[in-house]
Image: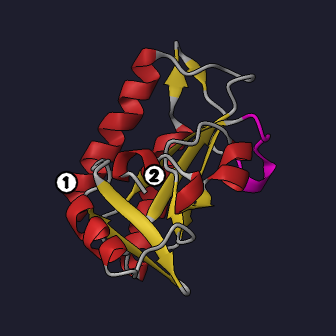
Amino acid sequence: MYSPFTSMPDHSRVWVYQSDRAFTSTDVEAIDQKIKAFLANWTAHDQALLASYEIRYDRFIVMMIDEKQAAASGCSIDKSVHFIQNLEKEMNLSLMNRMLFAFKTADNVSVVNRTIFEEKMEKGEITADTIVFNNLVQSKIDLNTKWEVPLKESWHKALLEV
């Protein structure tokens, strides 16, 4: 059952899906319709899940549920993954590639593969203070406080030996 994003509690569980390209306004409209329809019927063991979503920076889909209302089960998580995979096919997107890195430059969000990310670091275009996105956050409070962080404070630093 769909609930507005702002009304979801801070403990809500989140999943962040990052797009390989920016969404167009047409994409956003289609994604909105498809996600709302999915969330309206998303269940775990025949119990409706209190769920919401948000599209951020025309690049990220954030889905969440209040697990105190009803916990996600393996089957319900599988349903959401299948939904995202179908969305990828229907809209020619890549939303599950965890080897693409997103970072901020001024007011822009860029998404590149690891090789290009490392090249940009070598050139000084990406520094330890560059804001990166930690798509591994688990809760709404973490989304609000730990999702956009400097590279030097993110999991990326270990992978890239910053």
Res. 19 visible in picture: yes
**The disc label shown at residue 157, or none:** 2
- Residue at the spot of label 1: 89
From this view, report whether residue 147 is shown above or below residue 55.
above
Q: Earlier in the sequence, mark 1 or mark 2?
A: 1
Range covered by the magenta-colored residues: 3-11
Q: Nearer the viewer, residue 74 or 20?
A: 20
Q: Look at 50% across and 75% down and name the residue there.
A: 104
Residue furthest bottom as drawn: 106
- Neighbor class of circle 2 (other Cα within 10 Å; few <14, some 14-19, many 20+) is few
Residue 12 sits above or below residue 30 on the image: above
- Pair 1/2: label in front: 2
Q: Residue at x 30, y 36 (%)?
A: 82
Query: Callout 2, which amino acid?
Result: Lys
Circle 1: residue type: Lys
Q: Is residue 6 a member of the stretch shown in magenta?
A: yes
Judged from the image, the secondary structure of the residue bearing numbered disc 2 is: helix
Cα–Cα gap, marks 1 and 2 = 32 Å
Judged by its main secondary structure, the magenta piece is loop
